[in-house]
Image (tube, rainbow, N blue to C red):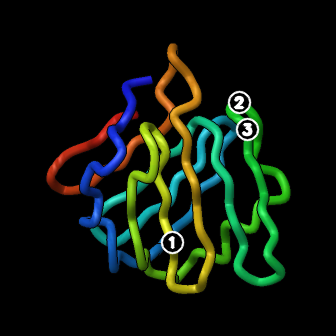
Amino acid sequence: MYGLKEGTDIRFLENLEVIQVCLGLFQVQIHFVGGSVSIEGKFIHEIAEGSVSVTHERGTLARGSRLERLLGARVKQARVIANGTTSLVFSNGDRILVFDDSEQCEAYQINTKQGALIV
């Protein structure tokens, strides 16, 4: 909805450990010590083992999710790789790609002690 420009510095997420993953009807939350990412829009979970990708569409429950794999992993790399698209690479080799997929609704939020980025 609001976009996030390619190259926006989100490296403040790097080295944060995933301590909780929450699945809701219309939202997935990934909590770190010191922040969180809340996702309402489309995202892809690329699973390192077996080169599998799981796509989750806006407005659907994240069925078949393997997001529990992120528990205890740290963010190894955090980048905005295209306008509105955020990439989080984790220490276990998994990657989450989050997309700004709507002009009307928020797609995701990155929350830290310093404030929030709403996309």
**Residue 115, percent from left and from top:** 19, 46
**Residue 118, percent from left and from top:** 35, 35
C-alpha span from label 3 to label 1: 20 Å
C-alpha span from label 1 to label 2: 24 Å
Which comes sooner in the sequence, label 1 or label 2? 2
The residue under the point 51% across, 14% down is 104
The residue under the point 62% across, 75% down is 94
Image height check: is 80 above or below 108? below
**Residue 25, percent from left and from top:** 70, 38
Image height check: is 54 above or below 59? below
> What residue does disc 2 label?
59
Q: Given the image, on which type of amino acid does mark 1 rest?
A: Val
Count residues near mark 2 (Cα–Cα under 10 Å), then give few for <14, some for 14-19, many for 20+: few
Residue nearer the viewer, 64 or 5: 5
> What residue does disc 3 label?
57
- Locate residue 115 relative to residue 77 in the image: left or right: left
Quadrant position of the N terminus in the picture: top left
The reply to whether the C-beta atoms of the residues labelled 2 and 3 are less than 8 Å apart is: yes
Quarter of image, res 10: bottom left
The residue under the point 81% across, 69% down is 52
> What residue does disc 1 label?
89
